[in-house]
Image (tube, rainbow, N blue to C red):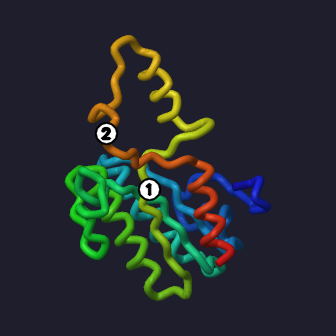
Amino acid sequence: LSDKSLDVRVGSITDEQSANSLVGDCGAIINLAYAGKSPAAIENNRNLVRFLARVQTANIVINASTISVHPAPFHTKHMDFKRPKPDSDYGVLKLASEREISRALTSSESSFYSLRIGPVYGRDQGISHMIFGDVSTAGFSLPFNGDLLSNAVSINRVCDAVVFLLKN
């Protein structure tokens, strides 16, 4: 995103002071955080959401979520976009995070968007390294014999979507 003429700030928000010092003057916030599923991590995610919702300068908040808030297989005919029903712990936690952010922002003037994306590939993305390792292994075959479409998305397309939301 930094090469798309945007000021990118990366850091940890653990309390109201760190939120204000890192993003307190930002017009847009993009939340990419996911701390895990332990009770401490869940509490950390809730605190992060609370602190982000208090940033008064943010006109737009974009939350990186996952298609895992829908049950597998990930195909639009199986997805209820108004009432998603995740079938994994990860999907349950991400849906709870979406709802928590949305609720926290109801009293603000910020617009809220949740991007439900599949695995992200591209330079410096862990999944890309994993895939290259897998395909170079003897006996590798594509899941479902390659008959199903992939839900993976390029990091470049994710950035394009974020820029589109910010400019429109």
| Residue 2 appears left or right of 91 | right
| Residue holding disc 2 | 147
Which amino acid lies under the numbered mark 1 shown in the image of this protein? Ile
Figure check: 101 above or below 125 = below
Figure check: 103 above or below 32 = below
Q: Classify 10 Å Cα crowding around label 2: few (below 14), some (14-19), many (20 and above).
A: few
Q: Position of residue 131 (x, y in %)?
A: 46, 29
Q: Position of residue 162 (x, y in %)?
A: 60, 64
Q: Position of residue 21 (x, y in %)?
A: 68, 64
**Residue at the extreme top of the image, as rendered:** 138
Q: Nearer the viewer, mark 2 or mark 1?
A: 2
Total labels drawn: 2
Q: Image point 29% across, 76% down: which residue? A: 82
> Counting residues from the N terminus, which is met first, the one under dot 2 or under dot 1?
1
Quadrant the N terminus occupies: bottom right
Badge 2 vs badge 1, beta-carbon distance below 8 Å: no
Q: Nearer the viewer, residue 140 or 117?
A: 140
Which amino acid lies under the numbered mark 2 shown in the image of this protein? Asp
Q: Image point 71% across, 73% down: which residue? A: 25
- The dot on residue 117 is 1
Q: Secondary structure at mark 2?
A: loop
Q: Position of residue 19 (x, y in %)?
A: 59, 65
Q: Image point 50% across, 25% down: which residue? A: 132
